[in-house]
Image: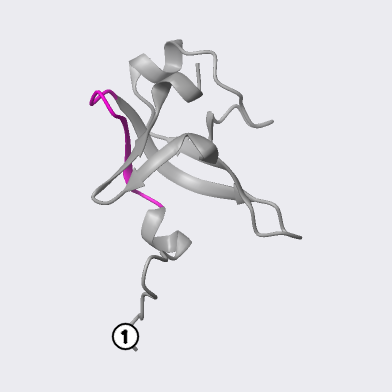
Amino acid sequence: MAEIEEEGKKFSKQLVGKTVVSKTGKKFGEVGDIIFETSSGELIHIVLTNTTSYTDKLELEKTKEGQLLIPFSAVIAIGDFMVIAEEDIV
């Protein structure tokens, strides 16, 4: 069955696995999961996997399991990569 993408909308499974980079090109890792508010559907955090040594040095919020989180509000573009505004997370 073909997946239909509504204009301007992406399904979460299309985001998982995308490389997360800053607007200056610094690599943070990959999207491992997305945390959202179930009652409103608001996207809260990106859970990072395959983090880089650069990301590991930042004092980012973590899950109980120690996975690094980036606020979804820092996302400025989604295409081949997920681009974030680094100044919004540090």
Q: Residue at x 42, y 66 (%)?
A: 9
**What's the magenta region?**
16-26
Residue 31 is one of the magenta-drawn residues: no
Q: Is residue 53 left or right of residue 36?
A: left
Is 56 in front, or is 37? 37
Is 34 in front, or is 64? 34
**Relative to 40, does residue 1 appear above or below in the rendering?**
below
**Relative to 35, does residue 23 appear above or below in the rendering?**
above
Q: Is residue 88 left or right of residue 1?
A: right
The kind of residue on which mark 1 rests is: Ala
Q: Residue furthest bottom?
A: 1
Q: Residue furthest top?
A: 57
Residue 63, picture quadrant: top right
Is 26 in front, or is 6? 6
**Residue 6, percent from left and from top:** 39, 75
Q: Residue at x 55, y 20 (%)?
A: 60
Q: Residue at x 34, y 23 (%)?
A: 52
Render colour scheme: one colour
**Residue 10, percent from left and from top:** 41, 64
Q: Residue furthest right?
A: 39
Q: Residue at x 44, y 16 (%)?
A: 56
Mark 1 lies on a secondary structure that is loop
Q: Which residue is mark 1?
A: 2
**Relative to 58, does residue 27 appear above or below in the rendering?**
below
Quadrant of the rendering where the N terminus is positioned: bottom left
Residue 22 is one of the magenta-drawn residues: yes
**Residue 15, percent from left and from top:** 39, 54
